[in-house]
Image: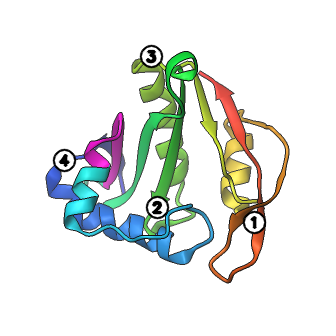
Amino acid sequence: MNILIREFTASDISEASAIWNDVVADGVAFPQLDLLDAETAKDFFMKQSFTGIAYDTEDNKIMGLYILHPNNVGRCGHICNASYAVEKNMRGHHIGEALVSHCMTKARELGFKILQFNAVVSTNSAALSLYEKLGFTRLGVIPGGFLMKDGHYGDIIPHYVVL
């Protein structure tokens, strides 16, 4: 397996939205409630500052993706935000790390100064470990900041890294 990351194209809609929708449907990491269809997926992925696609060069299968966009506007427009999704069967193979590292580089290229995550769910131990490894700073805990799929409210831990 050889993973590279490239920019999203319209031909990625089916595979990218399936991976994204799996995370949304799990209900434990992404704040979205609605799944993407072909039309909403194209609009969603194309409107980002950058959507990165992780694929296996051996078979061109998409293994994961990320979206990168401003976290705010105006005087806070230099801060960006991102979300990452890895195909379920490929988790644990460092694809998430490749996505986050690529995202940090792309964010710098686009002129962002800070990458901030607003809502890292406290039970997402893989993400928490990865962000620590990559030098992100935890900003504290927001109790009950995330509505889990089962209806209870879980804690979130915002993070940031200076780019």
Q: Any magenta on residue 83?
A: no
Residue tagged by mark 1? 123
Q: Secondary structure at mark 2?
A: strand
Q: Amino acid at mark 4?
A: Thr
Residue tagged by mark 3? 111
Tell me the CA gap for discs 4 and 2.
18 Å
**First of labels 4, 2 by sequence position:** 4
122 in relation to 151, above or below: above
Q: Amino acid at mark 1?
A: Thr
Give percent across and percent down for residue 125. Answer: 73, 61
12 in relation to 158, above or below: below
- Span highlighted in magenta in the image: 45-55
Question: Which numbered disc, 3 or 2, marks the residue closer to the eye?
Answer: 3
Disc number for residue 9: 4
Q: Amino acid at mark 2?
A: Val
Give percent across and percent down for residue 86. Answer: 46, 61
